[in-house]
Image (spheres, rainbow, N blue to C red):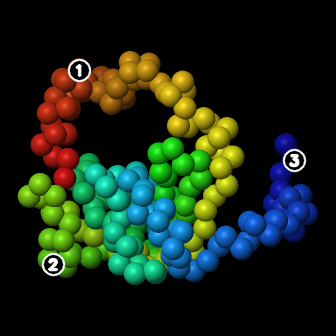
């Protein structure tokens, strides 16, 4: 297996990026990038820590983050599995990356920066939803912003209804956990999940 093991080899193999690949990267949210972030109901949050990397899905009923200013994003930590992998990473290594996806849009928007975990009561209260508050808010200071070209989503036909997986074609969470631990009642977990999710969405 032939591998590339240095930057010189890598650059020689790929050549130089085109002009458009470079000019799209800036250090703040301009009007266009702001509009994309405001339209995004979903993003992935990538963090790093001593144990390795973590990539976490984040979604909301409306914009997934709030824009405080052209260099600051606010991401509420809504109800989840309480593993807090991302948060444990952030308090030890502030570097983060966000990838915003907008249903029907073939590009993605990428944001790199640094984050802190904030539990200010007034800030938490500003994200109240159906009487529930997030446990914390991730405050992200933007370092770089740029959009990714559309080829990956076009190749995957991600938004094409014909490529959607039918319900029942993949294992359920309960089936997965039962496979890992035979004593786990996966059937009961799956049956209880809709009601449990409805009560803990926010």
Neighbours of disc 2 within 10 Å: few (<14), some (14-19), many (20+): few
Q: Quadrant of residue 25?
A: bottom right
**Of circles 1 and 3, which is in front?**
1
Q: In this image, 63 relative to 128: left or right?
A: right
Q: Position of residue 31 (x, y in %)?
A: 51, 74
Mark 2 in CB contact with mark 3 (< 8 angstroms) = no
Badge 1 is on which residue?
Answer: 187
Element carrying mark 3: loop
**Which of the two discs, 1 and 3, labels the residue nearer the N terminus?**
3
Element carrying mark 1: helix
| Above or below: residue 24 compared with residue 99 | below
Task: Indicate which disc residue 2 carries.
Answer: 3
Q: Say which residue appears at 35% left-offset and 59% top-offset.
A: 64
**Which of the two discs, 2 and 3, labels the residue nearer the N terminus?**
3
- Residue 52 in view of the camera: no
**Of circles 2 and 3, which is in front?**
2
Whole-angstrom CA distance, mark 2 to mark 3, is 56 Å
Question: In the depicted view, which residue is nearer to us: 57 or 130?
Answer: 130
Q: Position of residue 117 (x, y in %)?
A: 31, 74
Q: In this image, 112 relative to 39: left or right?
A: right
Q: Say which residue appears at 33% left-offset and 30% top-offset.
A: 173
Whole-angstrom CA distance, mark 1 to mark 2, is 41 Å
Whole-angstrom CA distance, mark 1 to mark 3, is 47 Å
**Which of the two discs, 1 and 2, labels the residue nearer the N terminus?**
2
Question: In the depicted view, which residue is nearer to us: 165 or 149?
Answer: 149
**Of circles 1 and 2, which is in front?**
2
Q: Position of residue 180 (x, y in %)?
A: 36, 29
Task: Indicate which disc residue 45 carries.
Answer: none
Q: Quadrant of residue 7?
A: bottom right
Q: Quadrant of residue 139?
A: bottom left
Badge 2 is on which residue?
Answer: 122
């Amino acid at each position: 297996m032939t591998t590339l093991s240095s930057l010189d080899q890598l650059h020689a193999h790929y050549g130089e990026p085109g002009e458009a690949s470079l000019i799209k990267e800036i250090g703040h949210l301009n009007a266009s990038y702001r509009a994309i972030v405001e339209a995004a109901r979903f993003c992935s949050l990538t963090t790093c820590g001593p144990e390795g990397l973590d990539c976490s899905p984040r979604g909301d009923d409306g914009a997934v983050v709030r824009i405080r200013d052209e260099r600051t994003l606010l991401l509420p930590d809504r109800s989840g599995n309480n593993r807090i992998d991302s948060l444990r990473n952030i308090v030890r290594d502030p570097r983060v990356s966000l990838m915003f996806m907008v249903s029907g849009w073939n590009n993605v928007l990428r944001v790199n920066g640094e984050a802190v975990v904030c539990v200010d009561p007034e800030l938490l209260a500003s994200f109240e939803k159906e009487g529930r508050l997030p446990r914390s808010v991730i405050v992200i200071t933007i370092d770089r912003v740029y959009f990714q070209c559309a080829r990956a989503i076009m190749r995957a036909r991600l938004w094409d209804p014909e490529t959607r997986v039918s319900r029942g074609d993949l294992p359920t969470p309960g089936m997965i956990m039962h496979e890992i631990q035979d004593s786990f009642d996966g059937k009961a977990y799956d049956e209880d999940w809709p009601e449990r999710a409805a009560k803990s969405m926010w």
